[in-house]
Amino acid sequence: MEEVKGRVRKFLGRFFKKHELQDDEDIFALGFVNSLFAMQLVMFLEKEFSIRVDNKDLDLQNFKSINAIVELIESKMVSS
């Protein structure tokens, strides 16, 4: 789990350069997220972790924090 979290943190760090994200911090509440970023995040997750993010997974709760993203990744890896 820590390896997955580290890879997600590294990716997000490219977009949140002036802010050190905490694992449970809501990235939407920070106001940095736009539709382009959201698409890049989904594409990164699918490629980096060899998972498929389905339409039913496209819920803000699954992407709002590092912890939420890691939970989504782990659930998708188990079900594949």
Image (tube, helix red, strand yellow):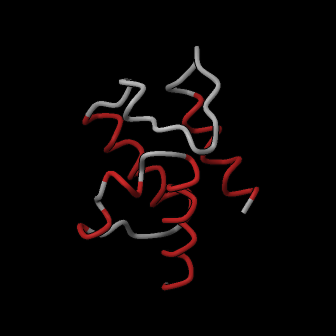
Residue at image location 47% in from the left, 49% down from the top = 44
Relative to 16, say whether 46 is above or below.
Answer: below
- The quarter of the rendered structure image containing the N terminus is bottom right
Q: Position of residue 25 (x, y in %)?
A: 54, 38
User: How many numbered callouts?
Assistant: 0
Q: Position of residue 78 (x, y in %)?
A: 56, 83
Q: Is residue 69 left or right of residue 3?
A: left
Residue at image location 57% in from the left, 71% down from the top = 74
Q: Is residue 23 left or right of residue 39?
A: right
Residue at image location 47% in from the left, 69% down from the top = 51
Q: Is residue 61 left or right of residue 36?
A: right
In this view, the residue farthest toward the right is: 2
In this view, the residue farthest toward the top is: 18
Q: Position of residue 56 (x, y in %)?
A: 25, 70
Residue at image location 39% in from the left, 70% down from the top = 52
Q: Position of residue 21 (x, y in %)?
A: 61, 31
Q: Quadrant of residue 3?
A: bottom right
Relative to 27, say whether 1 is above or below.
Answer: below
